[in-house]
Amino acid sequence: MSLLDTPIVQSLLDRVAGLDNDKGDARVKKITRRVVADMFRVIEDFDVTPDEFWSAVSYLTAVGQANEGGLLVPGLGIETFLDLRTDEAEKKAGLEGGTPRTIEGPLYIAGAPLTKGEARLDDGSEQGEVLFMDGQVRDLSGAPIANAIVDVWHANTLGGYSFFDPSQPKYNLRRRIETDVEGRYQFRSLLPNGYACPPDGQTQRYLNALGRHGQRPAHIHFFVSAPGFRKLTTQINIDGDEYLHDDFAFATRDDLIPPVVRVTDPAAIHARGVNAPFAQITFDFALHRDHAAAPATIVNRAHAEAA
């Protein structure tokens, strides 16, 4: 018999989870018992030594101290699994189609400047390939959604994000755009680069033990929301990136890879008010209407505060 299945360990698990009293939160108790029992099973099945166990505890402590929890979670596929569960729950509720969701990631900052219809995300101080992106927010029937909010953020040409990268101006490459009467949005920015986990950080330390890299392809994040519709959390990936289908965070979805058009026509360059060829992306968002039987898409999670 497994030690885990003996009466003494089963009684220990019950007491650990508070099942021997009628106080506390019943759901927390059930989850705690399952998590601790699964941990006991792993220790037993893999003959985990005390040294290994306490090394893992120290590692988790270091992850917290480095504030890398939001980086480790997608790296272990957990954030993608949560998305897949929401996808499945929506299907069971009869919701099909729409723009696919994918992970939020750890680098969102609330309160970006709000503009109507269009915005410029960069301040002109950084050199790079100019990007013009536009599209329309629609419902599933194709009707435009006016006054939707397209909250967009992405990395700079070095893979850094404003606020987390102190060299960048406040809210650089972050804006909220309210769609016009036809549901359209557009913005000018710089084509982002991908980024890597900090090479000496705790997430990369774990990935090294798994023989994995910590690279993300170039991408642009979005929250898209409107009254009466389900909030969409998604991102597009930049086609042609070497890590496009090898994202350490498992966020790539085929329907979220729009073509990148390189515009070299002198008349088109002049019309855009730039002096060099530029990149252009068009991407439309299709939102589901609110549905009482489907799980909530507004996720309450801690975010870094704007300094």
Image: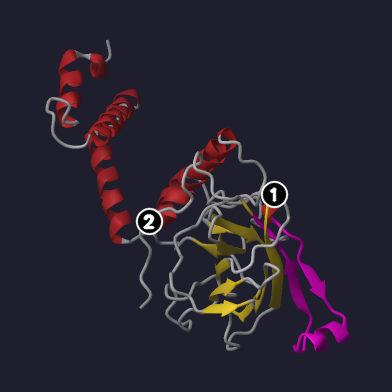
- Disc 1 residue type? Asp
Image height of 9 relative to 36, above or below: above
Q: Is residue 100 left or right of residue 26?
A: right
Q: Residue 280: image x %, image y %? A: 75, 72
Q: Residue 168: image x %, image y %? A: 48, 81
**Numbered badge on residue 73:** none
Q: Residue 267: image x %, image y %? A: 87, 86
Q: Residues within 10 Å of mark 1 (few under 14, many from 20)?
A: few
Q: Is residue 30 left or right of residue 90?
A: left
Q: Is residue 13 left or right of residue 198?
A: left
Q: Which residue is mark 1?
A: 254
Tag in front: 1 or 2: 2
Which residue sits at x=17%, y=14%?
A: 7
Which residue sits at x=50%, y=57%?
A: 104
Q: In which quadrant will I find the C terminus?
A: bottom left
Label 1 vs 2, first from the N-terminus: 1
Residue 277 magenta-highlighted: yes
Q: Which residue is mark 2?
A: 301
Query: Hey, which residue is sitting farthest top in the picture?
Result: 1
* Numbered disc 1: secondary structure: helix
Please report the bounds of the magenta region as a residue range.
257-286
Q: Residues within 10 Å of mark 2 (few under 14, many from 20)?
A: few
Q: In which quadrant will I find the N terminus?
A: top left
* Numbered disc 2: secondary structure: loop
Q: Residue 248: image x %, image y %? A: 54, 51
Residue 95 magenta-highlighted: no
The image quarter containing residue 19 is top left
